[in-house]
Image (cartoon, grey):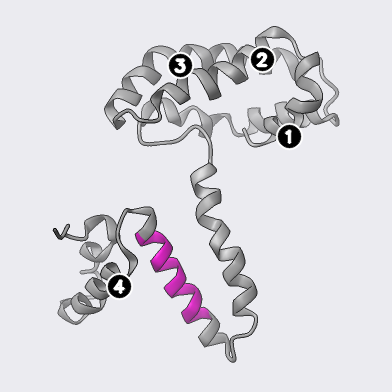
Amino acid sequence: MKMFPDISVVYLHKAPVDFRKGINGLSFIVEQALKDKTREERYVTRQSKTQSLLNEFKAWLDKSVTQVPPKSKLGEAISYSLNQWSKLVRVIDDGGLSMDNNRAERSVRPFTVGRNNWLFSKTHNGARASAVLYSLIETAKANDCEPYEYLEYVLREIPKLKSEDDHGHLLPWNMPKTN
């Protein structure tokens, strides 16, 4: 739904009430109330409230796709939403998913900075090693692991691996918690 914020400033005041209701109802009212809830609580609420809002929004999209010029910003946003619909509705069946991709975009931002730094690596292998290490650090952060402790854990456990397939416990979400 990334395209809608871009068009809302220009088109939202001209849009029908049901369009504004869909955007506001989905993004702000329901999801804001769920941000501090557990995965299970989000699932239950989405089953009861978000499902009906998504159904209304989909009906509006289906009706509007034939009424809005496809090359307009609003037309592009509608087409984009319809093309991504199967991905959007997955949020109903999993309380762990987010309605937007803000978290993913925030996690990619450091790589943009790193990409500029890796231009000055002396070798391709050096740049690759830096990128892999950076990826490990960001994945640890995303899973609430302190990066130094996580890397220390991985480096300590790698020699103990019995086979190439014996690495699942090294993933940050499987790292034993220390107190």
Pointers 1 and 3 in contact (CB under 8 A)? Answer: no
Pointers 2 and 4 in contact (CB under 8 A)? Answer: no
Residue identifier under label 3:
51
Pointers 3 and 4 in contact (CB under 8 A)? Answer: no
Q: Which amino acid type corresponds to the residue marked 3 in the rendered image?
A: Gln
Q: Which amino acid type corresponds to the residue marked 4 in the rendered image?
A: Leu
Across and down, in percent, residue 111 comes to: 56, 65
Residue identifier under label 4:
151
Q: Which amino acid type corresponds to the residue marked 2 in the rendered image?
A: Arg
What segment carries the magenta color? 128-140
Residue identifier under label 2:
20
In this rendering, the label closer to the viewer, 3 or 4: 4
Q: Quadrant of residue 18?
A: top right
Q: Secondary structure at mark 4?
A: helix
Q: Secondary structure at mark 1?
A: helix
Q: Earlier in the sequence, mark 1 or mark 3?
A: 1
Residue 158: image tag: none
Pointers 2 and 1 in contact (CB under 8 A)? Answer: no
- The N terminus: image quadrant: top right
The residues bearing labels 3 and 2 have C-alpha atoms spaced at a distance of: 17 Å
Q: What's the residue at 50%, 74% (across, down)? A: 131
Q: Is residue 163 left or right of residue 50?
A: left
Across and down, in percent, residue 142 comes to: 39, 54
The residues bearing labels 1 and 4 have C-alpha atoms spaced at a distance of: 39 Å
Residue identifier under label 1:
6
Across and down, in percent, residue 147 comes to: 34, 66
- Above or below: residue 25 compared with residue 36: above
Whether 134 is among the magenta residues is yes
- The C terminus: image quadrant: bottom left
- Above or below: residue 96 compared with residue 159: above
